Amino acid sequence: MADSEVTALEHAPGLKHHFDDTEQQLESSTLGMWVFLLTEIMFFGGMFGGYTVYRNLYPDAFASSSRYMNIPIGAFNTAVLICSSLTMALAVRAAQLGNKKVLIWFLVFTLILGCVFLGLKVVEYHEKWVDHHIPGPGFRYEDARYFHQAQILFFLYFAMTGMHAMHMVVGAGLLTTLIIMAARNRFSAAWYTPVEMIGLYWHFVDIVWIFLFPLLYLIGRTK
Amino acid sequence: MTHQVVPVRAYVAVFLALIILTITTVVVSRIELGEYNFIVAITIAVIKAVLVILFFMHVKQSSSMTKLFVGAGFFWMAILLVFILSDYFSRGWLPGATWWRS
Amino acid sequence: MSTTLSHPPTEERPNYLNVDYGWKSWLLTTDHKRIALLYLFSITAFFFVGGAFAVGMRLNLLTPKGLFAHDTYNKLFTMHGIIMVFFFLVPSIPATLGNFLVPPMVGARDLAFPRINLLSWYIYIVGGIFAITAIVRGGVDTGWTFYAPFSSTYSNTHVILAAIGVFVSGFSSILTGLNFIVTVHKMRAPGMTWSRLPLFVWAHYATSLIQVLGTPVIAITIVLLGMERVLHAGIFDPALGGDPILFQHLFWFYSHPAVYIMILPGMGVISEIVACFSRKSIFGYGFVAFSSVAIAVLGFLVWGHHLFVAGQSMYASMVFSFISFLVAVPSAIKVFNWTATMYRGSVSYDTPMLYAFGFIGLFTIGGLTGLFLATMAVDVHVTDTYFVIAHFHYVMVGGMVMAYLGGIHFWFPKITGRLYPEGWAKFAALVVFVGFNLTFFPQFVLGYLGMPRRYAAYADEFQILNVMSTAGASILGVGYLIPMIYLAWAWRYGPKSPQNPWGAKGLEWEQSPTPPPTFNFDVPPVMNEPAYNYSGEEKEVEIGR
């Protein structure tokens, strides 16, 4: 690859050749990550749309099926994710200050909290499986009037929380990569862009849950 | 290097606000408010999301372009929801088949 | 006013093509120009695959009774649509000409994320492999629109394979769009303000917005469709309490803006060509730039016009119909502005300009017939007939493909460093134009007379028009083959091109060698005049050259 002869420039850490300077590169990375998060908003938005439609079409079935949502686990998981957002923000802050040890600790805490969330999700899904509430041939519903509608609503529940959980798994993988990179001294106060970018991703996944929790677990409970 | 370093206090304050809002939304969901249950829950969720976006994701310190992109994203999802729902909500306005009510 | 370099290009000067050889230097490249060529070859291959299905369809439609089994015919039109839409038209200009030209046009050394650019090509190939696998395993018969519950429940063809292919290719589209948006925002050269950007770049920026905001919705629609096909929970199946119209809403939320992905880049090409071959700045630059963004935004608000007869509420339909009328306005503004550019311009009739003329006329017809379809009362009669098919082929083939061919010819010297044979090129353009109109104009009549689309057999009285259409298709096919031959020949044996054979304005022509070096510019470029400054006025003081 014809390399630039302009190597008279001192190479700032992590600076790629097609960028003029680190600031341009960082602004580009940030804008790029935000554009990607926009695509995620639209991706989940489609499911929120489908869910809203069916909630409005079948309000009674919805009220019936929301009794089976496990609020304690849901609420606790919400708190877990909020904590993980705090630890992630503090990790980015540590990177900003060039504090490697603190950075790694906070990344590890974030990862652990993420795994707690996923573990509780497994518990919840297991509950659903035991109750025969997983859509498909094994689906059973206690109130025969709402069998089909409830199946659709549970389908959307699994689609939405499942997609969210998949994003958490990817996030866990990304965090692991960051921990390894940080342990290998790849980051400094001059360059810690991946930490910040993955931080944005993690916060976004938290925001999705912030909406999922009330919509799936809390609405329709009082009827 | 990116933005000003935010003091730990600020992050912890946002964190506490988020926890309190979560507790609030769970408690309010137990109270029968009819249609308002939904509105209150969504409002609280929006406030929480805004806090995460502005402070944890540093949008408050970011350029106007970033803020525009973030706003545009949510606006576009709103387009999807509003227009689709406008179909479902206006279906009953003309006499005709209402297959889903059977 | 010639802007060619004073010395001719030498054989030995390193450029992006000869800087390195071997398959690794191509398959592991991060050079946006090489990636553009990777896309060019794959997209051309898919074009012929999709074209092969069209050949099958047109052969079948020569006689009223048909040639193939009806199930086979269903697979032909489905695969024709899927391949042409997702694997040819959506990536076409952005992934080839866009990838190649956006960086030099803004004065950058590469796109913002070169490795993501390469990844987007690999993702496209993986998606293509799924699609080809679906074909080889027996095809899909749901129509490219995958309407549920047929696709989710009743079809026993390879829906999931094809759906995965589409899902994966969507990521390719998203990554390309993301790259363009960041590049245009962050990597413009000094002096390259938004109001000096080539309209090609504005068009690609608007296209990228659509790609980024729309594609994820079809992605989730396909995920839900796949889950439904496996679990049969009933989300789109009325027998199980679901609503098939919900599928259509989610599907068309992307697929309507997708058609603007499939035309905006072509409009960008036309702006460049018309300005160059009229030797005049585009009339109403600001209006044209704004129209690109307006089309992108309004395009998201009209999808319900595909659901007029599906069971959508009358009131929602009226809103969608009205906004569909509005979205025609910025397109019309562009056509007026191109025409005004040519008026009192110094027009020459090289091949790219011939394709531009073709585009303007055929796109206008296609666009106007879109208004017929947006009119609910008319749509009730012509929806799901050949009228719709003629409409979208006029805009997509008469429009986009003509722009694509025009762009390929216009930038051929820049990309290859060679000149193509102008005589053959003009001849091929004529063949394409004649073949296209003979193929698709009869289809307007057929649709108006009531011949339904997606039918393997038809009433006897439609045969003459169908035969005309098939005859036209064979001519059109020849018209596409001819450039394949002479362009390939010219790449190897054509005369060497000077830096700026057309005397065009724009950083890619004036400040970048032909063909460009890997990082596009020998000297960091500066933009110190308005775009399309053919008249040579209002030039600022040159900075340090």
Image (cartoon, grey):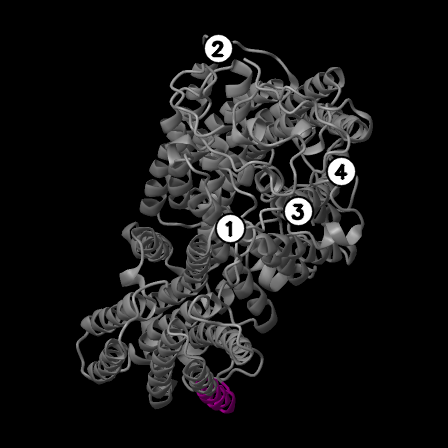
Q: What is the three-letter code of the residue carrying label 1?
A: Phe
> Which numbered disc covers residue C35?
3
Give the magenta range.
A116-132
Question: Can you give x and y, in whole percent of width and height, for residue A31 in the image?
Answer: 42, 55
Q: Is residue C242 visible?
A: yes
Q: Dot 3 lies on which element?
A: helix
Q: Is residue C383 above or below residue C230?
A: above
Q: What is the three-letter code of the residue carrying label 4?
A: Gly
Please name whichever residue, C480 or A185, is drawn nearer the observer in this view of the structure: A185
> Which numbered disc covers residue C66?
4
Disc 3 is attached to a residue of which chain?
Answer: C
The Cα atoms of the two marked residues, 4 and 1, are separated by: 59 Å
Q: Earlier in the sequence, mark 2 or mark 4?
A: 4
The Cα atoms of the two marked residues, 4 and 3, are separated by: 42 Å
The Cα atoms of the two marked residues, 2 and 3, are separated by: 36 Å
**Which residue, given by chain and number where applicable, does mark 1 sit on?**
A19
Q: Dot 4 lies on which element?
A: loop
- Asked whether disc 1 touches disc 2, contact meaning CB atoms under 8 Å apart, the reply is no
